[in-house]
Amino acid sequence: MRGKKGSPKLSSHEKPTMNDVVYIVLDSCRYDAWEAAATPNLDRLGVVERRWAYASWTSPSHQVLLMGLLPHASPAGVHASEVYRHELLGWRERLGAPELEFAGFLPQLNLPTALKRLGYRTMGRVSLPVLNQYTVFATGFDDYRLMASHADFAGMIAEMNFEPDRPSFWFLNLGETHYPYLLPPGDAPHLHGLHGVVKDLAGGTGPAVVGTGCDPAEMARLRAAQVRALEVVDGLMPALYAKLPADAWVIVTADHGELFGEDGYFGHGPVMHPKVFEVPLVEGRRPA
Ligand SMILES: [Zn+2]
């Protein structure tokens, strides 16, 4: 059994008291895809917010997410350092660790490393090859692995477990909402910049500019496919909730958005457009 809640200071004779945490990143999921999708199970976590990613593609965005900074709200009139401090101290409530201080993230500024110091078991499962276990993103994790399949949230849930005597942190990068949005093989278009450059990046991301080929009907079809992919993820949330301890904290967000033909762009990466930074965020305790 765990000890009294609310004390993150541990000795070898004390048992951890913090919440189990599940942190889900829906790769490439647009905020308005969430608005368009039926998400009855995700909605049980709370009201989804519109936030802004710090970067426009997977690798730099995950660097910031794994520092412990969630996508920001773009607040005016506040110095950036105060925003960072406020955001990092948001982990007090998520973890159930009211005594956590900003210094707890130093000097590494790496979320899983900070959580390990608090006694967490740190687990990572990722879908995008650019985040594989040989990269810096595995830093601070006890167990971190690229999934064999690009879109296997169900497999991640099946692997998840929790321990009675120490809290677990599960970081999940989901490929379902990333291109090709669960479309069957052959049903996704062959687009320059995806099947060329992206493949060379071992399934990461690449130049988003298509130039030609942003056929409106095709873009609408792909956008609808991302909405459906999010609904598939939503349909798996009850299986996740069923696995979680009662006090578990769940965060769901995206690393960046996606362009579906707006201003001549498709995808994400080296592109400056609001829709590639606009992302959803919802978090809260495991629904009862
Ligand atoms: Zn991504």
Image (cartoon, helix red, strand yellow):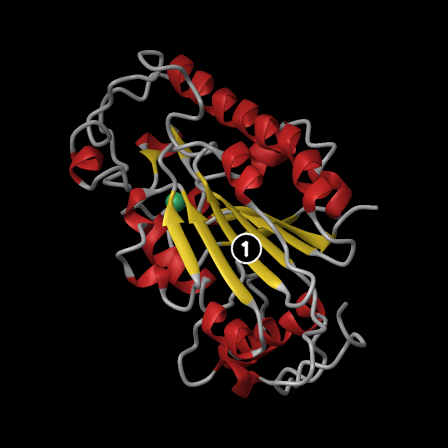
Image quadrant where residue 182 sits: top left
Q: Is residue 167 left or right of residue 5?
A: left
For the point 73% across and 53% down, the residue is 245
**Closer to us: 108 or 79:** 108
How many numbered markers are drawn?
1
**Closer to us: 150 or 73:** 150
Does the rendering let one see residue 178? yes
Against 15, is 169 above or below?
above
The answer to whether the residue bearing label 1 lies less than 8 angstroms from the nearest atom of ligand 1 is no
Most distant residue in the right direction: 288
For the point 40% across and 34% down, the residue is 259
Q: Secondary structure at mark 1?
A: strand
x, y percent for residue 69: 51, 66
Does the rendering let one see residue 57? no
Q: Residues within 10 Å of mark 1 (few under 14, many from 20)?
A: many
x, y percent for residue 164: 69, 61
Q: Read off the residue under disc 1.
A: 170
Q: Is residue 4 left or right of residue 89?
A: right
x, y percent for residue 195: 21, 27
In which quadrant will I find the N terminus?
bottom right
For the point 28% across and 42% down, the residue is 204
For the point 32% across and 33% down, the residue is 265
- Tell me which image quadrant ligand 1 sits in: top left
**Closer to us: 117 or 226:** 117
Against 25, is 234 above or below?
above
Three-letter code for the amino acid on which mark 1 is drawn? Trp
Q: Is residue 229 left or right of residue 46?
A: left
x, y percent for residue 133: 31, 54
**Closer to us: 70 or 250:** 250
